[in-house]
Amino acid sequence: MLLRDEIMPMLTIKDVARLLHIHVNTARRWSDQGILKSYRITRRGDRRFRQEDIARFLAEYNDFNTKKETDHQISPGGDTDKTGKIAVER
């Protein structure tokens, strides 16, 4: 049996959209695609999201963006290659 502390209030689609600064239809699409983990409740199939799942999504998104930025830093001194393009460290 679940303890009361283990049952956290779940977020609605509007809550998630507001937290992620996206449109509710984008949140629905991401839920359908499995990008955001959701739970269907009621006969209508309303979606609910666990706060922990949204926090995990944000952490993974931030890690991805941080890694992406560090992978494409411009080398010190602004070196250029033979074509005149700025050299990029990878």
Image (spheres, rainbow, N blue to C red):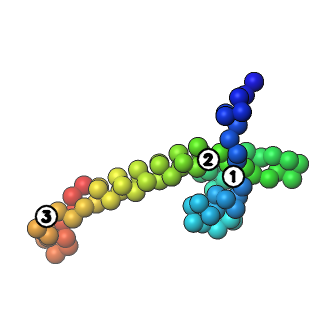
> For the residue labelled by badge 3, is the local secondary structure a helix, a strand or a loop?
loop
Q: Give how far across and how far down residue 45 sits, in percent.
A: 82, 51
Q: Position of residue 40 (x, y in %)?
A: 77, 46
Q: Which residue is mark 3?
A: 76
**The quadrant where residue 74 appears:** bottom left
**Which corner quadrant holds the N terminus?**
top right
Q: Quadrant of the C terminus?
A: bottom left
Task: Look at mark 2 in the image and give the residue it sits on.
Answer: 51
Q: Reply above or below: 9 against 13.
A: above
Rendered position, 24 above or below 52: below
Residue at figure coordinates x 64%, y 68% from the top left: 23
Q: Nearer the viewer, residue 19 or 34?
A: 19
Residue wearing tag 1: 11
Mark 2 is on which residue type?
Gln
| Discs 1, 2 touching: Cβ within 8 Å | yes
Q: Nearer the viewer, residue 26 or 86?
A: 26
Q: Nearer the viewer, mark 3 or mark 2?
A: 2
